[in-house]
Amino acid sequence: MSINLEAEAAVASGFVEKAPLERYVDPDRPSLVGKSRAELAAALGELGVPPAQRKMRVQQLWHWLYVRGVTSFDAMTSLSKELRAELENSFTADRPEVVAEQVSADGTRKWLLRLPGERPDERPHEVECVYIPETGRGTLCVSSQVGCTLTCTFCHTGTQRLVRNLTAGEIVGQIMVARDRLGDWPGGRAPEGAVVPTDGGRFVTNIVMMGMGEPLYNFEAVRDALLVVADNEGIAISKRKITVSTSGVVPNIKRTGEEIGVMLAVSLHAVRNDLRNELVPLNRKYPIEALLDACRNYPGLTNAKRITFEYVMLKGINDSLADAKALVRLLAGIPAKINLIPFNPWPGVRYECSDWETIEKFSEVVFDAGYSAPVRTPRGRDILAACGQLKSATEKLSARERMALRAMALTE
Ligand code: SAH
Ligand code: SF4
């Protein structure tokens, strides 16, 4: 089906998507953060560095940017003074601007980042990025879009109107910001009182593309960014420690395995198409059967490299024992992990989180069928950093709405 016909059929079936604004315009002096080796070579070419020298210069730049994390060309002492000055004239090593940092009682940190919009009078484009420290690891939850074109009914991000795709630089930039703020560069130190892994290793060890946005609807930028992040001469976070979460953009699932080669998480949330159509409206375009087919054929899938199925626990909606049994039947034959996520409520939402007892019973059925079924403990609720609560200030929440959100998150 051509894209237009597909879109028309989707609209006819009642599925509505918001259109993303492609409004990013490079500033006069673009940042080199997030650039691939080929793009750095092209940038050096623009400055007149002869082709024979480019490979070596790219290696040096790569090291300063991604291993050392320096923010100025001046600090790149293995480059000649002239080249440093020329780089300074045309480029920066800037990261997205941090407009707020919040620290939860449990050590979770959330940064609000401001990104350039098209016009100065426009509402700012903002995304959030969340750091979740645990024993032996630190997971960074990264955004792929400002808002999301999709409209999952239980997700707060889905209610945001403004949508823009992030550039690869803005995606890598979130990891750079986190490492800057945590002191996670060679010779760095965590800020006083920060909760970070204490095993002597790095502070950001895992990346999950589970912040704002649908990563597979911004495929190229996410791919280019993650290939920079996984490069073992740079930021060097192994592909096994990077997870892309999708609500089910079937045509890009295979590409994720082939072109990025990272771990896959799928937001399933329902075992029947009628219910999933309601919770995840994208299901009307790519129903459960097509989604699971794409999962079965995910390149590189083995028992050691399983797909994570996310399942948000909604009281009286998808949390019966019959649902649990249907879930294990549905996933039979797919190397899978099941992640049960307690629903995080927000004002105006029509769902509630399942009772703890129900979640435990559900989890037992899944566990007895041979799956590990950890219930994801909500983290950072006091700073609205938990799943589905990431919604940027772009959509001006009133002070009262914010307080209500906080109260709900804390009392849940
Ligand atoms: N768009 C992608 C990735 C971002 S959402 C996706 O949907 O997979 C990350 C995870 O948080 C998804 O599994 C999503 O379904 C879940 N989520 C969204 N809103 C939530 C909420 N209010 N409570 C709990 N989990 C939520
Ligand atoms: Fe978008 Fe994911 Fe939220 Fe659905 S759950 S609206 S795909 S961010």
Image (cartoon, grey):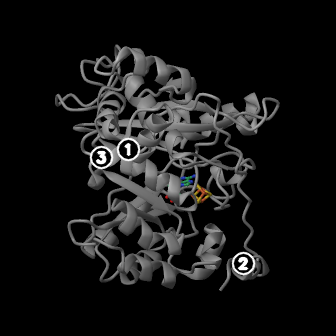
Q: Which mark is residue 231?
A: 3
State the image coordinates of residue 155 (x, y, percent, origin top left): 62, 54
| Residue lying at the far right of the rendered structure | 121
Q: Residue at x 50, y 61 (%)?
A: 313
Residue 391 placed where, x, y %? 63, 42
What count of labels does the image hold? 3
Instruction: Say what amino acid the circle numbered 2 marks.
Output: Ala
- The answer to whether the beta carbon of the residue marked 1 is less than 8 Å from any atom of ligand 1 is no
User: From what the image shows, is residue 115 above or below residue 211?
Assistant: above
Q: Which residue is mark 2?
A: 10
Q: CA distance from mark 2 to mark 1?
A: 39 Å
- Does mark 3 have its CB less than 8 Å from ligand 1? no
Find the distance from the CA under tag 3 to the CA under tag 1: 10 Å
Q: Amino acid at mark 1?
A: Arg
* Mark 2 Cα shell of 10 Å, populated few (<14), some (14-19), many (≥20): some
Counting residues from the start of the chain, the first of labels 2 and 1 encountered is 2
Q: Can you say which quadrant of the picture contains the C terminus? A: top right
Q: Nearer the viewer, mark 2 or mark 3?
A: 3
Q: Quadrant of the N terminus?
A: bottom right
Q: Which residue is mark 1?
A: 37
The crowding category of the residue bearing disc 3, from other C-alpha atoms within 10 Å (few below 14, some 14 to 19, many at least 20), is: some
Q: Are marks 2 and 3 in contact (CB under 8 Å)?
A: no
124 above or below 361?
Answer: above
Residue 106 showing in the rendered view: no
Q: Is residue 197 above or below residue 212?
A: above
200 relative to 185 in the view: left or right: left
**CA separation in Å, label 2 and label 3:** 38 Å
The type of residue carrying mark 3 is Asp
Residue at 29 percent across and 67 percent down: it is 306
Could you say which disc has been placed on residue 162 in the image?
A: none
